[in-house]
Amino acid sequence: MHYEGNIIRPPSEANSILLQVTVGCSRNKCTFCGTYSGERFRIKPDSIIMEDIAFAAQYAKRQRRVFLCDGDALIIPQKRLLKILREIQKQLPWITRIGAYANAKSLKMKSLDELKALRARGLGIVYMGLETGDDVTLKAINKGAASERMIEMGKKAKEAGFKLSITVLLGIAGRERSRIHAEETGRVLSAIDPDYVGALSLMLIPGTPLFNDHETGKFALIEPDEMLAELRTMIASTNLTKGLFHANHASNYLPIKARMPRDKEATLNLIDQALAGRIALKPEYLRAL
Ligand code: SF4
């Protein structure tokens, strides 16, 4: 397989065939993200992608899922993306699901019918980084879309038939807006009603604008107990009809996996116990991105 630069994928795609169809991220401007810094975004040539699919057809017969890397595969023009999906279906008929990252911009660029056509060709799940539902923070981190647009695009992805997984970032609003960030994120998640929510804890990446703001005292990184309190408020403010709320990423201080709405009260109680010191938080050295 041909890989260039940093390859990242959602935790749930750990066993998937990682097919790199773009290099970098078409936005590459979020102040906290150093994943593709210095990387010029480009769509990989069809010839390379087709070679990789042929390689996977020969050597990846046990893997049931494909994840289209990098940051924003949905930005690929419709015809080319359909061709890639068609080739995966043709050469890897055992694949049960194809996934990709999506953002508000790429979801907006495709019509609902185009998204449905991608769904019909096997694209089954999209992962969207919301980070926060707080408009002030969305602007501060240069996410490129306000909460109303995020809600609109999240609903559009669901209407197209995709499973939708949304990532939010604990600590991203700093100390002053922590509570507002948690409440507003709950509001946006409730409006979208995704299938999965993943809450990650912010880790500052050297070289990013947010890291520099922290160094100069403009941004306050909240403490583990404050992140937990933020998570509590976020879960209390989130009403999903049937989604899974995870906070069990390696970056988190207290692993949580809650089926909503069934586990909501039990999860809030668990966090209260941790906040009261009756459950130990993960030590710093065990956290990782
Ligand atoms: S957070 Fe996502 S959209 Fe923003 S720069 Fe990083 S990869 Fe791109």
Image (cartoon, rainbow, N blue to C red):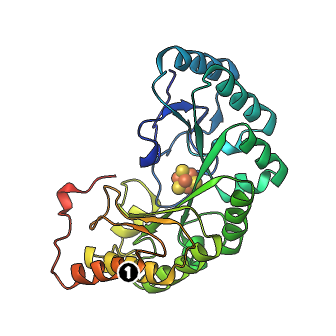
Kind of residue sitting beneath label 1: Arg
Q: Nearer the viewer, residue 16 or 139?
A: 16
Q: Secondary structure at mark 1?
A: helix
**Some atom of ligand 1 lies within 8 Å of the CB belonging to the residue at label 1:** no
Residue at image position (39%, 72%) is: 171
Residue with the mark numbered 1:
232
Whole-percent x, y for residue 108 in the image = 76, 57
Whole-percent x, y for residue 31 in the image = 50, 61
Residue at image position (25%, 57%) is: 287
Left or right of residue 83, residue 242 in this image: left
Residue at image position (54%, 68%) is: 242
Whole-percent x, y for residue 215 in the image = 34, 67
Q: Is residue 167 visible?
A: yes
Q: Nearer the viewer, residue 245 or 47?
A: 245
Residue 195 vs 34, above or below: the answer is below
Left or right of residue 241, residue 61 in this image: left
The answer to which quarter of the image holds residue 251 is: bottom left
The answer to which quarter of the image holds residue 23 is: top right
Q: Is residue 29 visible?
A: no
Whole-percent x, y for residue 105 in the image = 71, 56
